Image (cartoon, grey):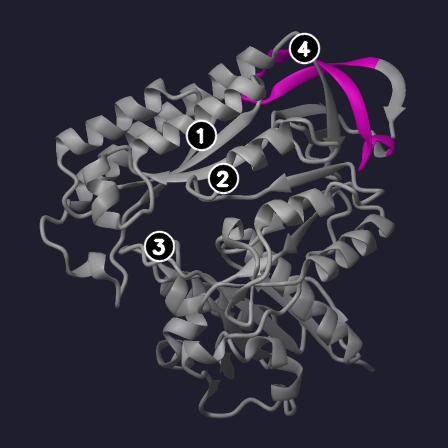
């Protein structure tokens, strides 16, 4: 009888695409992929270092895995595994830790599933993680996360990603288009382009061969994919030509997620971000001038060292006045081996929490205002496969979340609807515009 493997992914869309690629390696090696609770022989836990409490989360998942299958072989991969291999190897129950350069050779390393007294660690210095490993997620029929770029050459003072993933490197346009065609053939309607710094796309073997805009133009020609979404792109890399192309594109949707991190130029300088807030507001204005209904999401960090009350108010007012749709709010937390961790004028934890709460409230206000601006308009919704208490959900091209009574015929279908009202849970109620499905 074949061995069973289960996966658990912490962190970003990029991690999900890589977990899926690792899963296909296991399937090719004869393993059956099962749910976390199905007593597998092997657990693979893909970790993240960006969010708080990476250690705590990893320990908890390992503990729960051992409850499900006490003799299972537990392997930890991902960013946290690259940064803290020794720490992870000492978590009770962990059998193997694989760094960034080793995780895609996982099948070669898993030769004996016998649990040993001490975990084995394969973790080379991050300089060895210089190969691009293609990956895309499969399993959700509605959308796929397609990795086009990895690593980062930027040196933001708060970030460990270059330490965890290495330098910027990319897939070839030819290979990405090939994968997009495979995805289209599988029936998936939407591709989300992912990477660490996708606007920096085009570096292969340390040399720039292409630019992100060239990839965008090629992907727009892929038949069978209805929507392509850009997951996140730095404001200094979001060029006029990209914005103008998306505005008239066949497949790229009017949804941009653009990290800001702070609305204070003083703090942006301390963070070593490669733009100032004036450029950011210029990017937002450019998008809205061409795509008035575009959805714009923003990453922002509160409580960075040196952030005074005035700096935070500066950020709050800047965001409040921007024509944006929602925020992803991160409370700053110190990371080892980053310049920010050595900076003076740290912000007390209670103030960080207060500022985070204020921005979360602002985000809800922005999202509601954006949703209200879309009411009484027609939109095409791609419906998900979820069914919770008889309700299913879907998203418009510009990322308005709608709900409807569950209908199996709607799953993974594009349907023209009218946005009617905002429900108590913040989601949008709809009515059918016609019985005609959009193809």
Of marks 3 and 4, which one's residue comes earlier in the chain? Answer: 3
> How many neighbours does mark 2 have within 10 angstroms: few (below 14), some (14-19), or many (20 or more)?
many
Is 15 left, or right, of 337 in this rendering?
right
- Asked if the residue at tag 4 contacts the one at tag 2, i.e. Cβ–Cβ closer than 8 Å, the answer is no
**Residue corresponding to mark 4:** 377
| Badge 1 or badge 4: first in the primary sequence | 1
Residue 410, position in %: x, y? 83, 31
Q: Earlier in the sequence, mark 3 or mark 2?
A: 3
Q: Which residue lies furthest to the right in this view?
A: 436
Neighbor class of circle 1 (other Cα within 10 Å; few <14, some 14-19, many 20+) is some
Q: Is mark 3 on a helix, strand or loop?
A: loop
Tell me the CA gap for discs 1 and 2.
8 Å
Label at residue 52: 3
> Residue 123: x percent and y percent?
45, 83
Residue 419 in magenta stretch: yes
Q: Of marks 1 and 3, which one's residue comes earlier in the chain? A: 3
Query: Main SS of the magenta segment?
Result: strand
Residue ID at (18%, 38%): 351
Q: Can residue 302 be seen in this view?
A: yes
Q: Secondary structure under badge 4?
A: loop
Q: Which residue is drawn at 51% across and 48% down?
A: 199
Quarter of the view holding residue 220 = top right
Q: Mark 1 points at which residue?
A: 283
Q: In the image, which residues are magenta?
A: 409-433
Classed neighbour count for the residue bearing mark 3: other residues with Cα under 10 Å, few (<14), some (14–19), many (≥20): some
Q: In this view, does 81 lie above or below 220?
A: below
Foreground residue among 383 and 308: 308
Q: In 3D space, how far apart are the residues under numbered discs 3 and 2 (Cα atoms)?
A: 28 Å
Between tags 1 and 3, which lies in front?
A: 1
Residue 390 can be seen in this image = no
């Amino acid at each position: 009888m074949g061995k069973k493997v289960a996966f658990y992914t912490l962190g970003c869309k990029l991690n999900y695409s890589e977990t899926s690629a690792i899963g296909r390696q296991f399937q090719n090696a004869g393993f059956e992929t099962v749910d976390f609770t199905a007593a597998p022989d092997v657990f693979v836990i893909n970790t993240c270092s960006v969010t708080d409490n990476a250690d705590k989360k990893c320990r908890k998942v390992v503990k729960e895995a051992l409850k499900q299958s006490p003799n299972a072989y537990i392997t930890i991969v991902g960013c946290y595994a690259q940064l803290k291999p020794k720490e992870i190897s000492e978590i009770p129950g962990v059998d193997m830790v694989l760094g960034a350069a080793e995780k895609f050779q996982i099948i070669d390393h898993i030769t004996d599933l016998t649990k040993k007294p001490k975990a084995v660690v394969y973790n080379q210095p991050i300089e060895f993680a210089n190969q691009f490993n293609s990956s895309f997620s499969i399993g959700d029929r509605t959308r796929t996360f397609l990795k086009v770029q990895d690593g980062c050459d930027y040196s933001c003072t708060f970030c460990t990603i270059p330490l965890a993933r290495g330098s910027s490197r990319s897939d070839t346009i030819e290979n990405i288009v090939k994968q997009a065609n495979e995805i289209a053939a599988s029936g998936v309607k939407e591709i989300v382009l992912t990477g660490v710094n996708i606007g920096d796309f085009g570096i292969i073997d340390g040399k720039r061969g292409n630019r992100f805009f060239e990839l965008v133009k090629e992907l727009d020609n892929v038949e069978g994919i209805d929507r392509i979404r850009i997951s996140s792109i730095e404001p200094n890399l979001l060029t006029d030509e990209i914005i103008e192309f998306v505005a008239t594109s066949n497949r790229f949707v009017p949804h941009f997620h653009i990290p800001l991190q702070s609305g204070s130029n003083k703090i942006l300088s301390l963070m070593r971000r490669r733009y100032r807030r004036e450029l950011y507001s210029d990017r937002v204005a450019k998008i809205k001038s061409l795509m008035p209904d575009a959805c714009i999401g923003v990453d922002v960090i509160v409580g960075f060292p040196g952030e005074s009350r005035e700096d935070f108010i500066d950020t709050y007012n800047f965001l409040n006045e921007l024509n944006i749709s929602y925020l992803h709010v991160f409370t700053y937390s110190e990371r080892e081996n980053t310049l920010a961790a050595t900076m003076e004028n740290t912000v007390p934890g209670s103030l960080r929490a207060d500022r985070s709460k204020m921005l979360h409230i602002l985000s809800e206000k922005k999202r509601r205002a954006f949703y209200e601006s879309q009411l009484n308009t027609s939109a095409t919704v791609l419906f998900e496969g979820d069914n919770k208490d008889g309700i299913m959900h879907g998203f418009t091209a510009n990322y308005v979340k709608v709900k409807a009574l569950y209908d199996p015929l709607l799953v993974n279908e594009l349907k023209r609807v009218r946005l009617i009202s905002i429900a108590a849970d913040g989601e949008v109620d709809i009515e059918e515009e016609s019985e005609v499905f959009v193809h």
